[in-house]
Amino acid sequence: METATPPRRRVPRPRADALRNRERIVSAAREMFVQFGPDVPLDEIARRAGVGNATVYRHFADRGELVHHVLLYVTDRVATQADAAIAAVDADPAAAFEALRGFAHAAVDERIGALCPVVSEALDPDHPELRAARLRLEGAVEELMERVRAAGQLRTDIGVGDLMVALSQLTRPLPGSSGCLIDFDQFVHRHLQLFLDGLMTPARSALPGHPATLEDLRDKAH
C-alpha cells in the first residue's frame, strides 16, 4: 500500500510592511556607519529607521549580519548605476564619457570608501554572497569603461582599478578628521570632477607605472 505524500508546506512571503522596515533599517545603518563608524549602537540605527529595537533584531540576528546586508545593498546600488550608464552609452555613444561621469558622481554618493573600515573589521570578503556582488560590480564598471574607451573618449592607459581606487579614496574619511572643523565632504564632487577630467582623451601627459587592475587591488587587500 502506497503512503500518501504529505502536502508541501508553503513558506509565507514577507509582508510588504516587513520588507519596507528591512529596507529602512539597512538604509539607516548605511548612513550611520558612514557618519559614526562600525560601533554605532543598534538602538540609534533603529531610531534613525523609525522602527523599534525588536524590529531590528527580528530582521538581523546581530551586527555582523546587518553589516553584511548593508554592503550587499550598497554594492547592488552601485552596480545598478553602472548598468544604467552602460545603457546610456549604448543609446548615445557620442555622450559616452558623460555617462561615465554621471556614474562616478552617483557612486561616490554611496560613500564606498567610508564603509571600507566597517567591512574590513566585521566581514569575510570571500563570503559567496559578497564575492558574487563584488564580481557583478567590477564586471559592470569594467564593461562601462570599455564602452567609453571604444567610443574614443577614455585614455588608453587607465585601468578599472584606477577608477575604483579614486571612488574609494575620495569617500574615505581622512585620518583624524572626525573632530575637524572643515567639512571635507563638500569637496568630494569637485575633486572627483578634476580626476575625471584627467581620464579624458587626449591625455595631457604620460602616467607613471601601469594601469591599475582589479587583481592589483585584490593583491593589496590580501
Image: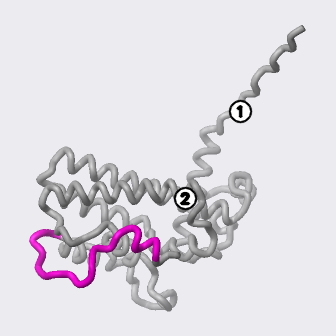
Residue at the image position 47 percent from the left and 59 percent from the top = 134
Question: What SS does tag 2 mark?
Answer: helix
| Label of residue 183 in the image | none
Instruction: Say above or below: 21 vs 180.
Output: above
Label 2 sits on residue? 130
Residue type, label 1: Val
Could you say where residue 169 lies in the image, as x and y percent from the top left? 39, 78
Colouring mode (rainbow / by chain / secondary structure / one colour): one colour
Residue at the image position 51 percent from the left and 71 percent from the top = 115
Question: What SS does tag 1 mark?
Answer: loop
Instruction: Say above or below: 167 vs 147.
Output: below
Compare marks 2 and 1 and give the one earlier in the sequence.
1
Q: Disc 2 vs disc 1: which is toward the camera? A: 2
> Which region shows up in magenta?
200-219
Residue 210 colored in magenta in the image: yes
Magenta stretch: dominant secondary structure: loop
Q: Do labels 2 and 1 touch, CB within 8 Å?
A: no
Q: Quadrant of residue 213?
A: bottom left
Q: Quadrant of residue 194?
A: bottom left
Could you say where residue 23 lies in the image, as x and y percent from the top left? 56, 52
Cα distance between the residues tagged 2 and 1? 25 Å
Q: Residues within 10 Å of mark 2 (few under 14, many from 20)?
A: some
Residue type, label 2: Leu
Depth check: give the residue in front, 75 or 111.
75
Q: Residue furthest right?
A: 1
Residue at the image position 56 percent from the left and 66 percent from the top = 125
Residue at the image position 68 percent from the left and 67 percent from the top = 42
Residue 216 colored in magenta in the image: yes
Q: Residues within 10 Å of mark 1 (few under 14, many from 20)?
A: few
Label 1 sits on residue? 11
Could you say where residue 53 lies in the image, as x and y percent from the top left? 72, 60
Which quarter of the figure is the N terminus placed in?
Answer: top right
